[in-house]
Image (tube, coloured by chain):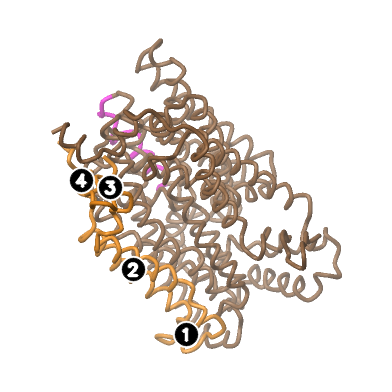
Amino acid sequence: LVDVRKPVPGKQRFALWYDANVRLFVLLIAIAYVLHQDWWFWHTATPLVLGFIPVGLFYHVIYTVAMVGLMWLLVRRAWPSHLERDEP
Amino acid sequence: VIPAAVVFVYLGIILYIGIFAFRSASRGAEDYFLAGRSLGPFVFLLSLFGTNMTAFTILGSSGHAFHNGIVTFGLMASASALVIPLGLFFLGTRVWALGKRYGFMTPVQLFRDRWECGHIGTCIFAVQAALLVPYIVIGVMGGGRALNAISGGMVPYWLGGAVVALVVMSYVFFGGMRGTAWVNTFQATLFLLFGAAAIGIIGTGMGGFGSAMQAMAGSPLLTRERIPPLYFLSYTFIPLSSLTFPHMLIFCLTAKRMAHFRRTVVLYPLCLLAIWFPCVLLGVAANQAKDVPAIQAKIEARTTLARQGPNLSPAERDALRQKMGADDVVLLLLDRYAPLWLAGMLGAGIMAAVMASDSQILALSTMFTEDVFTFYGGKERFGEQVQVHTGRAFVIVLAVVAYLVALKMPASIFELAVQYGFTGYAALSPLLVAALFWRGSTKWGALASTVWASVAIASIALFQWALPHPAAVISIGGWNLLERTPGGTSVLGFMPVLPVTVISAVLMVIVSQLTSRPSRQTIERYFPTEQTTAALR
C-alpha cells in the first residue's frame, strides 16, 4: 500500500533512488530548504519593496509563493496514485 | 459595547453552524469522530488550515514580530510553507489511505497495527495527550483575554473564558467532527478576510506603512539581526510538529477522496501567506504607533530591560517582561485605528483563531474513546452508541477541566508547556515516518523515541523553569552545551527541537536494528512487493 517499488536487478534495496523523478524532487526539496536560510539579507533592510516591505521580508514572501510552484510540480509529477487504487 | 456585541453575534453563528446545521447526520462513531470520512475539497482545505491556526498565529505572531521584527515571518511562515505541505503530501496521503483501508481513526491505532503492539500504543497515547492538554487550556485563556480586550474590559476574564469554553464544548459535543470542520471552515474564511482588511484599515489609520517603515530605518526590527542564524536554522524543525499533531492527522482521515489533498498541498502556502504576512507587518509597524499609550509602555519596558537588564533583580526583570507582553498589539491597533463596528468584525476574526481548541478537544476525545475505551474492550462490552456517548462525555469533562485550570493556574506555565509541546511533537515525527516508510522499524524503536521525547522535554522545561535568564551555562571544552537564553534554552547554539528530534530519529534506527520486527504478514500489508500486489489482483 505504502510504496510499490519497481525492482532493478542487483539494486533492489535502493531502487527508488534510480527513478529520475525521485532524484529530481529530492534535489528540488533540498534546494528549497537551503534557500530558506537566506543569510545574504540578514543585516539589510533596504530596499523597501513597494515602499514598505523590507527586502528580507519580501524575499520570504516570494519564497512562500515559490513553494506553491514546488507543491504544484510535486502534485503533478509525483502524485502517489498507487494509494488511490482502493478508492471506491 | 459594539465590538463585543458583534463578537457575541459571531459566537451565536458558529454555535448554529456547529449544533443545528449538522444534527441530521448519522450517529455512528465514524460519523461523529471523522465526519464519515466525507469532507469535500473546499471544507477539507479550509478546516485543515483552520485547525492549525491558533491564538498563537494571530496574537502570538504579531507580538513576536513587535519585539523581534520581520524574522518572525521566516521563522514561522515560510518554513511552514515548505514543511507542512510536504508532510501532507508524503505522510497525510498515506495516513488517509491506511485509515480508509484498515478503518483507523487515530494515529495510535495505526502504530498498534503497524508494530503489533498494545501497551506501547497506550504509552504513545499518554505522551500525545499530555502534550495536547496545554493547547486546550491556552485556547480557553486566549478566548478569555481576547473577549476581555475586545469588550474594553466589560466582559471579565473569567466570564470570557467560560463563554468560549461553553461555545466550543457545545458545538463539539453536538456536531462532532462534521460541526467542527464546518465551524473551522467558517473561521478560516473569516480570518483570511481579516488579514487583508486589517492591513488596509490600520495602514491607512497610521498614515501608511511606507512612512512607518521609513521612520524605522536603521532599526534591527527590519532585519534579522536579533536572531542568530543557528536558531533560525533549527526553527525549521518546529513545523514537523504540525505533521504529528493528533488533530492534524485525524483531520487527514476526514477527506472523502485522496484527490482532495492535491488542492490542499498546493494552496496551503498561500493560506499561510495570507495570515502571517499581515500579522508580521502589523506587529513590526506597531512600533511606530506613537499615539497608542499601551504600545509605548511596552516599548519603554523593552528599552529599560535592554539597557539595565543585567543590573536588575530577577523580580524587576520579570515585571518588565510582563509589561512587554505584546500578544495584544493587534487588538490595540484595532481599538485605535478601526471604526467600532469594523473592530467588532475584526475582533470576531481574532476570536476565530483563538478558538481553534475545538479540534484539539475533539481529537483528544477521539483518542480516548478509540485508543483507551475501545482498545480495552469498552466498545465490545457496551456497543457503539455508548462509545459515542463516552466521547461526548469526555468533551464536557475536558472543557470544564480546561476552564477551571485556566482560572487557577498562571498562564506562564502553559505558555512554557506549549513552547515545548511543539518540540515534543516534532520529536515524535520519526515515529510516523518510520511507520510509513521503513519496514525495519519496530515497536521498541517507537517506544525508545517516545520515552526520549518525553524525558527530554520534561528535562529542558525543568532546566528553564529552575534557572531564570541570565543563568548558568553548561560548557564543555569551551562549547556552550546548554545555555539559558532570554527566550528559552539553546543547545550548542541550536533550539532544543533540533537535537531532540535528531536523537529521537537515531534512537528509532538503533533500537529497531537491535530488536525483532513485526510478523512478515504485517510488513507485507504495509509494504507490498510486486508479487503480493499481483497475488492480490
Q: Which residue is mark 4?
A: A82
Disc number for residue B43: 3
Q: How far apart are the alpha carbons under marks 2 and 3?
A: 30 Å
Q: Which residue is mark 2?
A: A28
Asked whether the viewer can see residue A75, the reply is yes
Q: How far apart are the alpha carbons under marks 1 and 3?
A: 37 Å
Question: Looking at the picture, how far across and down is residue B139, in whole percent?
Answer: 53, 45
Q: Regarding mark 1 in the picture, which secondary structure is present there?
A: helix
Q: How far apart are the alpha carbons under marks 4 and 2?
A: 23 Å
Nearer the observer, B374 or B452 = B452
Who's the residue at 43% across and 71% down the image? B199
Quick check: B198 left or right of A5? right
Report the chain holding disc 4: A
Q: Earlier in the sequence, mark 4 or mark 2?
A: 2
Q: Are marks 2 and 1 on the same chain?
A: no
The tint of chain B in the picture is brown
Nearer the observer, B260 or B491 = B491
Q: Are marks 4 and 2 on the same chain?
A: yes
